[in-house]
Image: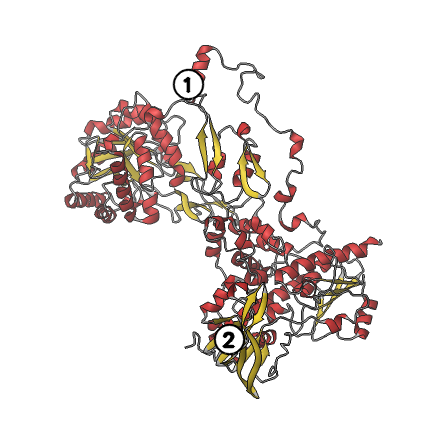
């Protein structure tokens, strides 16, 4: 049985799954319920300066029938009295001494920071997270992401906190910056014990087509919010990797962003995170998702022979390279499994219109065929194919040759002229432009449009009889 | 023991005849439309006799453009809602869905189609209007799927159109012949009213055209005449005892059922003769009307039935029992039907052989003959120069629907011998274009 427990910069937790500082950690009631359900830790909803919230706070991004693949909010930090929060932190810690309770904080002056750090320490918090990430509402008041975007200010505040902190301090970073490692290095210089990332991404999740206003709508108006949910995971993973690989950061990382199941968590961990934080998924599905997360993680670790989380932290990092270090001699091409193919021809139209015209249709069957010599191995067909393992990318080179752009640069064999013979697509076949005209019109103009010319119709009234209701 | 209690009220009738393809709500439509793959050169389009651009309308539903979806459907097929509900989608669009290649559930195309069109009908979305008047007139005989489709298309091309209908309601077999669990009268008629209001053709109900004199009047006043007359009554079996009370034709039985609902009488033990889709319908309907036993008797083996497998499954599902390789010899009884005398058969080289000495009487108190509809030959003979093929079908140009009398055009069952609503709708649209081409040629 693998050991899921962690010691994250001195904060101990029975498993690496923490609730991120957000609405699910707004009260002792919720945190206790989460711990009861199996969560290892919770970062309390940010305590700090007094705020007033609006009504209508969240907006969602749906994809077809899938709800909330993206999510944003314009909610501020905790609007509950500090004393209530402190009392509840104390109560939670009494009941769950071995779970991690981390107090997220956001105030302004040095004195305020000193006071609030002491308060949460006295309440029994296991750690502190500095909210330098909130990209809406608080940043306008000089806090949240306004701090995260100014490494020097960030460092100064971390130094203030470290003057009184007796428990581990995590700095939470904003992704609304061009290079995440700059504030990460500032956190380290300031003496922080760890970093967590990413906070939400400044966003507009949608516009109401009738009210002409962005979601979420507050009395006919809206504002940019903070974006999170499954859609942001790729951005988070890249930033976690950037911090994990940077030689001057060297801090434990709590990975945040789009984590909804064990696979997402493992990805964060393989790229260097040693704890993970979850918010949107808990807001969407409730605390019960933790059972799938711990079970999946345990099974994966058992299958891979990992005894502790630390056996896998950063395990993918050696394989994340700069582009110039990738092997230009590696060659894959697509293969279609005729037994599995259902004949949707999405691969055909994707390659034809969106890639390299390397798939052709065949007489008498709806199963398309790969044109080997045109296939550049881009993966597109395998990505659009709706059938599991139907289109696979098969290795064509024998694996003996290895040559990177960097090596070619050093050897002086890179193309340098616009029409250089050594350029990649120089002798790649492309059809004549005019061959596109009218091609397969009978297939791309489907239905009755194939048979009938359009009729000129008398103009219609623009609205229906009942549309004004 | 009967599967269904005899319905005694309209709600009980509707419960027994619950819709096989119930209307989707917007959530179900969103979920189901999300499954569509948007295939290239989609097989569902090719499987649809009316060539509806299925992936396009499903995508339109998925993006909240339900009105656009309805337009896509109606542009190809004016019986959009009706076809969504009564088409044998299992063997057409849904049967062609690529998901079936992996034994996965196909997209519920029929129900999505009805979802979009019913939204448009109920919200009275104006999608079409008549074309600019071209000064020419077409008479249409029969307001069935062929006649109404031709009327819509001709109106959009600018023709004046008068439809002459023998019965009191439009849509032909859609309202008089389709099983009630496939579509309700109300929704059939709502679609007809929707089309009539948009295209503005005139329908004269209870106006059968039966004489040469009436045809001459049409030939004189109209530039072309469209025959959408469908088929006639059930073919007689020419068996002794056929005239006994409670021995009825399936088409007549279903027509009455569609109008009388729970007031429709049915036997306690019903024998349905035939192996086609109409036989399956009549058998299912008898069971749903509360008949205790329903037997489906067919001359050949089960595998040779003309009915679609899913139609037979449907009948079996409501308790209908099959009796195969039997041929009826006589309807026995005393004034009223008391049974059917059968003889067992064997099929040899495709020919049905009667097995002498195997006669038996299967008792029953009702017989429904689902043995095909007759052709309307006496009427057709009133039209000079009209060629009829050996099966009694009107001969017409495949592309234009023009008959051998150049003034007459035709589509639907009278021409194809009896097919689905969708076939009639598709043919008639093409024929309307044929009429337009013919009448425009001299200009």
Q: Which mark is residue A176?
A: none
Residue position marked by numbered label 1 in the rendering: A402
Give the letter of the chain under mark 2: B
Image: A271 above or below A337: above
- Residue B50's place in the image compared with B179, above or below, is above
Residue B115 placement (x, y as % from top left): 53, 58
* Image location (x, y in percent) of residue B395: 74, 62
Q: Nearer the viewer, residue A409 or B229?
A: B229
**What number of labels is visible?**
2
Residue B385 image position (x, y, % from top left): 81, 65
Q: Residues within 10 Å of mark 1 (few under 14, many from 20)?
A: few
**Mark 1 and mark 2, same subunit?**
no
Residue B333 visible from this viewpoint: yes
x and y, in percent, of residue B195 in the image: 65, 63
Q: CA distance from mark 1 to mark 2?
A: 77 Å
**Is any part of residue A18 visible from this angle?**
no
Dot 2 crowding, Cα within 10 Å, few <14, some 14–19, many 20+: many
Drawn side of residue A128 relative to residue B306, left or right: left
Label 2 element class: helix
In front of the other: B285 or A219 = B285
Q: Report the front residue among B133 and B287.
A: B287
* Label 1 residue SS: loop
| Quadrant hosting residue A151 | top left
Residue name at image x 55 percent, y 65 percent: B305
- The answer to whether mark 1 and mark 2 are in CB contact below 8 A is no
- Quadrant where the N terminus of chain A sits is top left
Residue at the spot 80% in from the left edge and 57% down from the top edge: B439
Q: Which quadrant holds the C terminus of chain A?
A: bottom right
Query: In front here: A373 or A412?
Result: A373
Label 2, on which residue?
A: B286
């Amino acid at each position: 049985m693998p050991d899921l427990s962690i010691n994250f910069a001195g904060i101990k937790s029975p498993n690496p799954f923490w609730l991120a500082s957000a609405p699910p950690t707004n009260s002792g009631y919720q945190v206790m319920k989460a711990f009861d359900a199996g969560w290892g830790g919770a970062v309390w909803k940010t305590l700090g300066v007094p705020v007033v919230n609006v009504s209508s706070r969240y907006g969602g991004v749906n994809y077809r029938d899938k709800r909330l693949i993206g999510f944003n909010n314009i909610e501020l930090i905790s609007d509950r009295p500090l004393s209530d929060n402190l009392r509840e932190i104390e109560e939670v810690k009494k009941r769950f001494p071995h779970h991690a309770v981390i107090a997220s904080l956001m105030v302004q002056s040095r004195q305020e920071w000193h006071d609030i750090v002491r308060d949460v320490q006295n309440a029994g918090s296991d750690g502190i997270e500095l909210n330098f990430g909130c990209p809406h509402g608080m940043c306008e008041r000089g806090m949240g992401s306004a701090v995260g975007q100014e490494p020097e200010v960030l460092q100064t505040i971390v130094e203030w906190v470290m003057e009184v902190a007796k428990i581990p301090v995590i700095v939470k970073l904003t992704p609304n910056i061009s290079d995440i490692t700059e504030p990460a290095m500032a956190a380290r210089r300031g003496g922080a014990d760890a970093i967590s990332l990413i906070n939400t991404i400044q966003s507009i999740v949608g516009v109401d087509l009738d009210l002409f206003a962005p979601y979420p709508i507050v009395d006919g108006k809206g504002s940019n919010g903070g974006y999170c949910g499954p859609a942001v995971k790729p951005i988070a993973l890249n930033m976690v990797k950037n911090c994990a690989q940077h030689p001057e950061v060297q801090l434990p990382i709590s990975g945040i962003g789009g984590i909804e199941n064990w696979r997402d968590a493992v990805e964060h961990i393989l790229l260097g995170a040693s704890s993970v934080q979850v918010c949107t998924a808990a807001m969407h599905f409730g605390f019960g998702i933790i059972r799938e997360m711990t079970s999946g993680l345990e099974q994966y670790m058992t299958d891979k022979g990992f005894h502790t989380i630390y056996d896998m932290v950063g395990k993918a990092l050696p394989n994340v390279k700069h582009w110039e270090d990738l092997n230009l001699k590696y060659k894959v091409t697509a293969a279609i499994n005729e037994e599995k193919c259902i004949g949707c021809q999405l691969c055909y139209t994707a390659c034809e219109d969106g890639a390299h015209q390397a798939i052709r249709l065949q007489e008498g069957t709806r199963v398309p065929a790969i044109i080997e010599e045109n296939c550049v191995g881009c993966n597109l067909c395998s990505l659009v194919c709706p059938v599991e393992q139907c289109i696979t990318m098969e290795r064509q080179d024998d694996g003996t040759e290895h040559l990177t752009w960097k090596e070619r640069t050093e050897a002086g064999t890179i193309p340098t002229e616009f029409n250089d013979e050594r350029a990649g697509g120089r002798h790649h076949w492309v059809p004549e432009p005019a061959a596109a005209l009218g091609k397969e019109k009978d297939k791309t103009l489907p239905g009755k449009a194939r048979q009938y010319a359009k009729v000129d119709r008398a103009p219609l009234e623009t609205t229906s009889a009942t549309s004004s209701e | 023991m009967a599967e269904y209690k005899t319905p005694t009220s309209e709600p009980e009738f509707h419960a027994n005849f619950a819709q096989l393809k119930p209307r989707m709500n917007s959530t179900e439509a969103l979920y189901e439309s999300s499954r569509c793959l948007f295939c290239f050169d989609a097989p569902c389009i090719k499987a649809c006799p009316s060539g509806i651009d299925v992936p396009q309308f499903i995508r339109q539903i998925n993006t909240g453009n339900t009105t656009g979806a309805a337009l896509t459907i109606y542009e190809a097929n004016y019986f959009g809602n009706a076809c969504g509900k009564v088409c044998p989608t299992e063997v057409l669009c849904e049967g062609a869905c690529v998901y079936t290649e992996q034994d996965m559930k196909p997209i519920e195309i029929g129900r999505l189609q009805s979802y979009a069109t019913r939204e448009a009908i109920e919200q009275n979305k104006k999608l079409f209007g008549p074309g600019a008047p071209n000064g020419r007139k077409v008479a249409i005989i029969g307001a069935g799927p062929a006649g109404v489709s031709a009327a819509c298309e001709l109106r959009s091309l600018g023709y004046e159109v008068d439809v002459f209908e023998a019965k009191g309601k439009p849509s032909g077999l859609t309202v008089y012949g389709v099983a009630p669990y496939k579509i309700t009268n109300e929704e059939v008629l709502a679609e007809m009213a929707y089309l009539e209001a948009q295209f503005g053709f005139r329908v004269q109900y209870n106006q059968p055209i039966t004489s040469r004199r009436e045809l001459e009047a049409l030939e004189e006043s109209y530039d072309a005449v469209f025959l959408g007359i469908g088929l006639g009554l059930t073919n007689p079996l020419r068996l002794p005892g056929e005239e006994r009370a409670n021995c009825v034709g399936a088409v007549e039985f279903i027509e009455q059922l569609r109008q009388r609902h729970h007031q429709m009488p049915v036997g306690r033990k019903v024998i349905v003769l035939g192996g086609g889709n109409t036989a399956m319908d009549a058998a299912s309907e008898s069971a749903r009307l509360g008949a205790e036993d329903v037997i489906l008797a067919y001359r050949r083996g089960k595998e040779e039935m003309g009915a679609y497998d899913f139609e037979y499954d449907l009948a079996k599902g409501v308790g209908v029992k099959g009796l195969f390789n039997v041929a009826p010899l006589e309807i026995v009884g005393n004034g009223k039907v008391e049974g059917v005398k059968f003889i067992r058969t064997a099929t040899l080289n495709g020919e049905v052989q009667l097995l002498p000495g195997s006669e038996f009487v299967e008792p029953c108190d009702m017989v429904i003959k689902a043995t095909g509809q007759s052709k309307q030959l006496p009427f057709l003979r009133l039209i000079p120069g009209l060629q009829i093929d050996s099966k009694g079908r009107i001969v017409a140009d495949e592309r234009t629907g023009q008959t051998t009398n150049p003034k007459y055009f035709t589509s639907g069952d009278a021409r194809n011998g009896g097919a689905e609503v969708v076939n009639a709708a598709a043919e008639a649209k093409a024929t309307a274009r044929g009429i337009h081409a013919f009448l425009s040629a001299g200009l």
